[in-house]
Amino acid sequence: MSGKPLDITFVPGTKPSVVHIPTPVSYHWKKEVKEDLDKDVVLGTIEPVPTVWCLRMVVTPKKDRSPKRTVDLQKWNAIMMREIHHTPPPFNQVSVVPTQTKKTVLDAWNGYHSLLLSPMTRDAATCMTEWGRYRYLKVPQGFHASGDGSLSYF
């Protein structure tokens, strides 16, 4: 994707949320989770960094029982202000596709990790892991306003 980075606006007067103790990763997933963190650093999705804000990383199982890294964004989602825009409901969008045409659905690899965060927002997008703090350079998966920024790309 290309376009301007997503700038996240927090409710005025909000204080940073800080986590000092990481959530433990199951022993049998430690190596794989650390490799995934290192891979995301190489991809430019996250970077190791000290910061004031800090969210909690939580690892849960996928359907195939491999580890899925997530970030607990509950506090972040509660204190940020959403962009205001209107998007037609999916039914209305597909209703205008002409008949006798092919229709397809695409799923972008790494989804919202293609959408840059603005430099002013990056410090707030930090998570605590057993291997230190990592700051998101791109939008974290599960952020409820991710679609607000991605719509400006189309």
Image: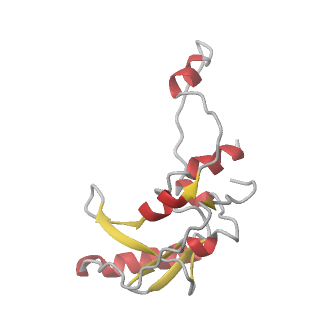
The reply, left or right, for residue 48 in relation to residue 119 is left
Q: Nearer the viewer, residue 14 or 116?
A: 14
Q: Nearer the viewer, residue 63 or 151?
A: 151
Task: From the top left corner, tell me how far across and down residue 113 is, in percent.
Answer: 57, 60
- Locate residue 81: give its quadrant: bottom right
Q: Residue furthest front?
A: 13
Seen at 29% across and 80% down, the residue is 24
- Drawn side of residue 151 relative to residue 69, left or right: right
Residue located at (61% from left, 33% from top): 87
How did the renderer colour the structure? Answer: secondary structure
Q: Nearer the viewer, residue 8 or 119?
A: 8
Quadrant (top left/top right/bottom left/bottom right) for the C terminus: top right
Q: How many marks?
A: 0
Image point (55%, 26%), residue name = 103
Residue farthest to the top?
A: 99
Locate residue 132, reporting x and y percent.
46, 87
Q: Position of residue 98 (x, y in %)?
A: 62, 15
Q: Is residue 126 above or below residue 97?
A: below
- Looking at the image, is 70 positioned above or below residue 19? above
Q: Where does residue 47 sit, x and y in percent of width and height?
A: 58, 79
Q: What residue is drawn where x is 58% and y is 69%?
A: 45
- Would you identify the image quadrant in which residue 20 lies? bottom left
Q: Residue 34, relative to residue 151: is it above or below? A: below
